[in-house]
Amino acid sequence: MAESTGGVLLLAAVEYSRGSRPEVSRCTTTARGLILIMMGMTIIDIPTTPPGRFAHQRPAARLEDAFKIYGEGDSAVRALDNVSVEFTTGAFTAIMGPSGSGKSTLMHSAAGLDHLTSGRVFIGDTDLSGLSDRDLTLLRRTKIGFIFQAFNLIPTLTAAENIELPLALGGNRPDPSTFARVVEVLGLSNRLGHRPSELSGGQQQRVAVARALVSEPEIVFADEPTGNLDSRTGAEILSFMQRAVRDVGQTIVMVTHDPTAASYADRVVFVNDGSIVDDMLEPTTDAVYDRMKAFGR
């Protein structure tokens, strides 16, 4: 059934006003994206802390002994099977795996969008399991950014209003200098008064990236951010995300199926059958492609 933007926003507003978490897993992609914006808005012997230059940096997010199980009895599916992993501050991490591997569940759990069956999730030093739904919503709104594959812009709002929306829902406005810097680097300065229907796909995704970054969150989760873009535009978006990490210390965790997109990251975490099976630093397209071929599907 088709969903209207107004109906989706009304659902989110009602749930949020009750202090509860909308059941986003049962919604379509468009509905889920809009609701998450309202909400604030992600074994082989693998080390919990990544090696090399990230070994002594504190994690921006981490999961400890995480299980996520759907169903019961013989039909139960372990989307996450005893996963412990850290996402380092100031690093660009890609999560990869075959379809159904648990990579999206891993990211959504790390972002506090899905509840674990057991285990713990931290954003910085905050244990999400100890938060009420209201406090979890506020944490997502102030500390987490989210970039959606399908953009999930509000069609009746201008680009500027879409960028400001998460902050506006909390009664705040972006820092003017931060807003100006982000929109200038993303090439949006002359498109701020345009609505999504007046923007190209690449411009819409730039707006979605700006929306995630303008509040200067501690961590940004990106769900296949270049999946709907041509290769040139996708490369531009990935290059900007890479610069945001290297130049200003932003932390980004990205789910992708594309080895070329993963090569922009500092690190790739490989997931299969709900478990982390490999951890690669300084990835290249060929190295990631070869590792993915080993999954055999």
Image (cartoon, rainbow, N blue to C red):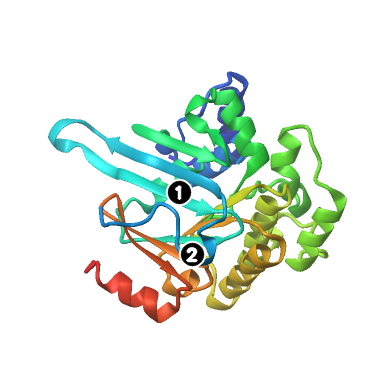
Task: Tell me if I can see residue 200 in this picture.
Answer: no
Q: Amino acid at mark 2?
A: Gly
Q: Amino acid at mark 1?
A: Met
* Residue 205 percent location from the top left of the image: 62, 61
Q: Which residue is mark 2?
A: 227
Q: Nearer the viewer, residue 159 or 264?
A: 264
For the residues labelled 2 and 1, the Cα–Cα distance comes to 16 Å
Which circle marks residue 107 in the picture? 1
Q: Which quarter of the image is occupied by the N terminus?
A: top left
Tell me if 198 is positioned left or right of 107 in this view.
Answer: right
Tell me if 237 is positioned left or right of 109 in this view.
Answer: right
- Chain-order first, disc 2 or disc 1: 1
Residue lying farthest right?
176
* Residue 228 percent location from the top left of the image: 51, 64
Q: Going 76% across and 51% down the picture, which residue do you hit?
A: 158
Residue lying farthest front?
56
Q: Going 66% across and 48% down the picture, which residue do you hit?
A: 155
